[in-house]
Image (cartoon, rainbow, N blue to C red):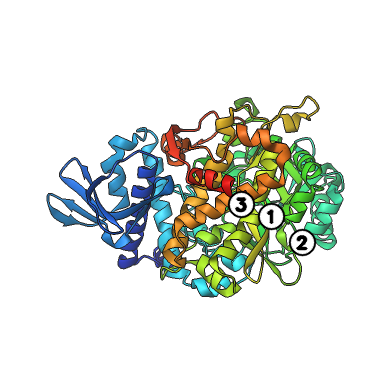
Amino acid sequence: MNSDIKNQEAVNHFDASLWNKVNALFLRKAISEFSHEKLITPQLTKINDEFNDFTIELDNQISYFFSARVLPLEHWWIDLTSIRKEQNETAAPLSIIEFIFEVNHLLKIPTDMLPTYLEELSNTLYGAIYKLKKNTITADELAKSDFQTIEKNMFEGHPCFIANNGRIGFNADDYQKFAPEASNGFKVLWVAGHKSKTSFTSIDSLNYTAIITQELGEEQHTVYQNTIKGLGLNPDDFYIFPMHPWQWQNKLSFIFADDITNQKLILLGEGKDTYQPQQSIRTLYNKSEEDKYYVKTGLSIQNMGFMRGLSPYYMQTTPGITSWITALLKEDNYLQKQCFSMLGEVATIGYRNVNFEPLGRTNAYNKMVAVLWRETPQQFLQKEEKAVTMASLLHIDGEGNALLKAFIDSSWLNVDQWIKNYLDAYLKPLLHCFYAYDLAFMPHGENIILKMKNNVPFGIFMKDITEEVVVFKEDKNYSSAVKRLVVNASNDVKSLTIFTDVFDCYFRFLSQILEEHCNFHHLDFWELVSQSIKEYQNEHPQFSSKFTECDLFADDFILSCLNRLQLQNNKQMVDLADPVNRLQFIGTIKNPIAKFKTVLNEFN
């Protein structure tokens, strides 16, 4: 009986009406993003006052009909209720899986990649229907909520990718335990790795004893040391570190059986603290003691174009990169003024599986046992301040209401004032890192944590500052770790760190939400963006030559397509060692702020 109940729980959130809704939502997203990336070309059939009518005519007498507005950056704002499908001139139900098959002659997903992509998409639908069924907190309620409540209740995932919550490797029970939207938190496992195969690295102000004492506590540390002694071994020969329970159950118990049998890798037991998985899924937040570090571990599931392992070799350089970036930026007066902070990745442990090392360091089997400790926002906020994932600004609740509007309404600022504050906090520091230091982060919604006071942004925390960062300037004095971050790129490609990562992958969606939910016209938003950039340029005339070389007011820019990346290789979407090499460039796209360049020059 118990097993029957458990099996039923795997599908308890299934609901026919919600299933139809999530298929419509993802079909809308697919049509919008595939059209944006020039994979499909809807045909205009009727011009109306606002939303024009379009069709997609396919083989086998299949047609899709919908109404849409095409905003700047060729962003397709599609009326969800208008989407219809006909087959042989008869109404047919909407199915995103069927749609992928129907348009794959245009998408050209490789035959060997298609099943994996469809599995990722199916898993994404599974999560979407769960969120709509279970996570019913409204936008107004979320606006009053704390950091982790907002984090847990995000719906969209990455706004560009269709299959963005694949998590291949999780079963239904794992989903309930470990998916951020479903989990109520769990305890990590603690293991001991023999120092002959384990490396510890930290920033200069920390050491292993300090980290383990803070994160584990002296009492529990002593218990684990005694466990090692009880095996007839010397605790000083081991590093103790946390590990995701899924990783132990599904990977380490099998693949590391040799080391476990020979007591090179020892299971010590379950820790006392409860951790909440974050949107990035392998990063864990300590719910029991919020002043402790984030823990990020290897988690060998397939998710959105990558196996989510963690390299023990890469971990050896991580604290050094943290120290370098901190030394470079921390004392910058402008960044301090903008309340820009980075969450340092302060210590790491990596364990090597020597049996698999001949496969190469980049092989997924050599990225299974590693951990890093990262600073959390709670360590730096004052009493009346709160941290909020920037992904929240794109969140639409189950009733169709925008969290962004709830933030603005509760702040007592008008939309114009609120957006100006947001651009000061988010955009200007990115511009400064780019122009002053030739440095670019990956500033998408999940990687940015807003500093908020009275629901108004006044600064940001940047995370993933060592893995998702590039440096565009070579220097012979760079350490070997920093040299690995250097990317040689043309000025057009360098500019994509703003054009693609900020404009196309975030502001494009934000502008629609502002118009749809806040009655703030998309052109007014882009004008504020242009003003923010020009303000920065006027404040920093010493970079005028760089402003010309990487001109953010250029008429157009290269269209870099994210779904095309995933569709071509959903197992290794990008080579992090050479992130530019695999980018999918498809022509150019008009720059939404180019029209404001002359106006701003005249104004200035």
Q: Nearer the viewer, mark 2 or mark 1?
A: 1
Disc 1 + disc 3, Cβ < 8 Å:
no
Q: Residue at 36% across / 43% down in the picture?
A: 34
Q: Does residue 427 appear in the picture of this structure?
A: yes
Residue annotated with mark 2: 379
Q: Quadrant of residue 81?
A: bottom left
Q: Does residue 466 appear in the picture of this structure?
A: no
Percent across and percent down for residue 564 are 42, 37
Q: Residue at 31% across / 67% down in the picture?
A: 17
Q: Quadrant of residue 310?
A: top right
Residue annotated with mark 1: 461
Q: How far is mark 3 from mark 2, CA to CA? A: 30 Å
Q: In the shown orientation, is residue 89 left or right of residue 586? A: left
Tag 1, which secondary structure?
Answer: strand
472 over 64 or under it: above or below: above
Mark nearer the N terminus (3 vs 2) = 2
The amino acid type found where label 3 is placed reads Ser
Decide which of 237, 278 is in the foreground and name it.
278
Image quadrant occupied by the N terminus:
bottom left
376 over 197 or under it: above or below: below
Tag 2, which secondary structure?
Answer: helix
569 over 280 or under it: above or below: above
Q: Check residue 532 in the rendering and tell me which mark sits there, or answer none.
A: 3
Q: In the shown orientation, is residue 91 left or right of residue 394? A: left
Percent across and percent down for residue 107 are 34, 37
Percent across and percent down for residue 206 are 85, 48
Q: How far is mark 1 from mark 3, CA to CA? A: 19 Å
CA neighbours of label 1 inside 10 A, class few (<14), some (14 to 19), many (20+): many
